[in-house]
Image (cartoon, rainbow, N blue to C red):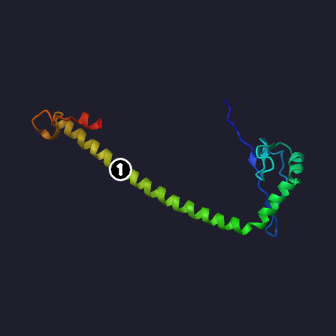
Amino acid sequence: MELATEPDVYSPNIDDNGNYVDRIPSFHSNALANGIRCPCGTRKDKVYISAPLFAAHCKTKTHEKWVQDLNTNKSNFFTENQKLRDIVHAQKIMIGKLELELSSKNMTINYLTQELTKIMTVGGGTLLHTQPTATATATANDLLMF
């Protein structure tokens, strides 16, 4: 069984002035062996498998408008990027707290399981060493099956 691979997603380069510009990638490297997909919206599911095909795509009006819009909205992308970074940071903190809480609860479960096992082993299986009655005959196995 072979591993399924996806085409890379194209992103334009940034020139010395900070503007987005198209640069046709080399399709001779192994990195682009599966082709490249452009997110400009011209043909969303189209995979380009050669440099001439992709160069022709980059000359379409829709693709050129997409690059122009990227340059026009640079500050919006920066602001959005900062917001997303803040969200990721907050989520990392939340995940860390939840992992600590989970670890604490796992330790509590392990401790209580050990104590229950001790009671079951020492007490002959009856809870709190009491005389068995119709309502108070819970064994450790019954308690573990909650």
Q: Residue 9 placed where, x, y %? A: 74, 49
In the rendered view, would you say 30 is above or below 142? below
Report which residue position mark 1 lands on.
105
x 52%, y 58%: residue: 91
x 84%, y 44%: residue: 28
Q: Residue 129 placed where, x, y %? A: 12, 39
Q: Quadrant of residue 79?
A: bottom right
In the picture, measured across the screen, residue 8 lies left or right of residue 55, that is left
Q: Quadrant of residue 123?
A: top left
- Give the residue furthest to the top: 1
Q: Secondary structure at mark 1?
A: helix
x 86%, y 44%: residue: 50
In the picture, measured across the screen, residue 95 lies left or right of residue 112, that is right
In the picture, measured across the screen, residue 52 lies left or right of residue 103, that is right
Classify mark 1: residues with Cα within 10 Å, few (<14), some (14-19) or many (20+): few
Q: Is residue 23 visible?
A: no
x 77%, y 41%: residue: 34
In the rendered view, would you say 77 is above or below 54? below
Return the residue nearer the eye: 98 or 73: 73
Kind of residue at disc 1: Lys
Q: Is residue 130 visible?
A: yes
Q: Residue 65 placed where, x, y %? A: 83, 59
Q: How many marks are shown on the rendered structure?
A: 1
In the rendered view, would you say 65 is above or below 137? below
Q: Residue 33 placed where, x, y %? A: 79, 41
Which image quarter holds the N terminus? top right
Which image quarter holds the C terminus? top left
Return the residue nearer the eye: 41 or 83: 41
